[in-house]
Image (cartoon, helix red, strand yellow):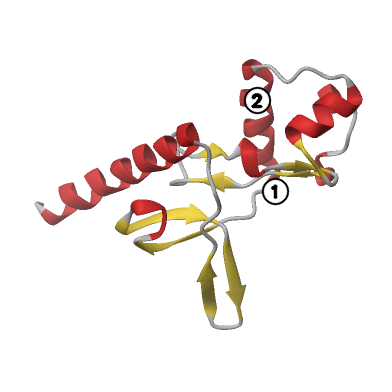
């Protein structure tokens, strides 16, 4: 990744939400090598603009380096009976545990908007 002078393999970003336009990277929970994004920027003297975040999010989606699984939420993140991608522990029989990480308020709002998008499709299909 040119902005940070690193290979994308060293970027660990968790992409939350549905697999479409409403998915988003949780920057507060993302890492470069073993640093938080903010700590890496401070240590390397690199500014991380909103435009660069959007570009990195797209590269992350294309590289398939997200670490989330689409699963039914039953109260996690304040959401019920809706499928979105969140961090999980996956075992031989599927999702063993949904990891409810502390998202920033703007990230939680994005997750709820993504879930609302999924919910609208579910509601539409129920009425067909």
Residue 13 coordinates in the image, percent (x, y): 67, 44
Residue placed most toward the observer, 15 or 77: 77
- Left/right placement of residue 46 relative to residue 55 reads right
Residue placed most toward the observer, 111 or 18: 111
- Which residue is painted at 52% across and 72% down in the image? 97
Point out the tag, 2 or 1, that comes first from the N-terminus.
Answer: 2
Residue placed most toward the observer, 115 or 97: 97
Which quadrant of the figure has residue 49? top right
Disc 2 is placed on an element classified as helix
Residue identifier under label 2: 53
Residue 1 coordinates in the image, percent (x, y): 83, 30
Marks 2, 1: nearer the viewer: 2
- Left/right placement of residue 94 relative to residue 112 reads right
Q: Is residue 117 visible?
A: yes
Q: Is residue 61 visible?
A: no
List the single residue furthest toward the bottom. Answer: 93
Residue placed most toward the observer, 17 or 47: 47
Residue identifier under label 1: 65
Give me the C-alpha separation between circle 2 and circle 1: 15 Å
Q: Is residue 67 above or below residue 117?
A: below
- Which residue is painted at 58% across and 40% down in the image? 26
Q: Is residue 34 above or below residue 74?
A: above
Residue 55 coordinates in the image, percent (x, y): 66, 24
- Which residue is painted at 61% across and 82% down in the image? 92
Crowd around label 1: few <14 · some 14–19 · many ≥20 (10 Å): some
Crowd around label 2: few <14 · some 14–19 · many ≥20 (10 Å): few
Which quadrant of the figure has residue 80? bottom left
């Amino acid at each position: 990744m040119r902005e940070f002078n690193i290979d994308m393999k060293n970027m660990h970003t968790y992409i939350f939400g549905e697999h479409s336009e409403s998915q988003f990277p949780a920057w507060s929970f993302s890492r470069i090598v073993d640093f938080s994004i903010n700590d890496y920027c401070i240590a390397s003297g690199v500014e991380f603009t909103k435009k660069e975040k959007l570009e990195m999010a797209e590269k992350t989606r294309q590289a398939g380096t997200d670490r989330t699984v689409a699963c039914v939420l039953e109260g996690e993140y304040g959401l019920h009976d809706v499928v979105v991608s969140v961090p999980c522990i996956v075992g031989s029989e599927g999702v063993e545990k949904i990891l409810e990480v502390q998202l920033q308020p703007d990230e939680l709002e994005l997750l709820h908007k993504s879930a609302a998008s999924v919910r609208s499709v579910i509601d539409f299909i129920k009425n067909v």
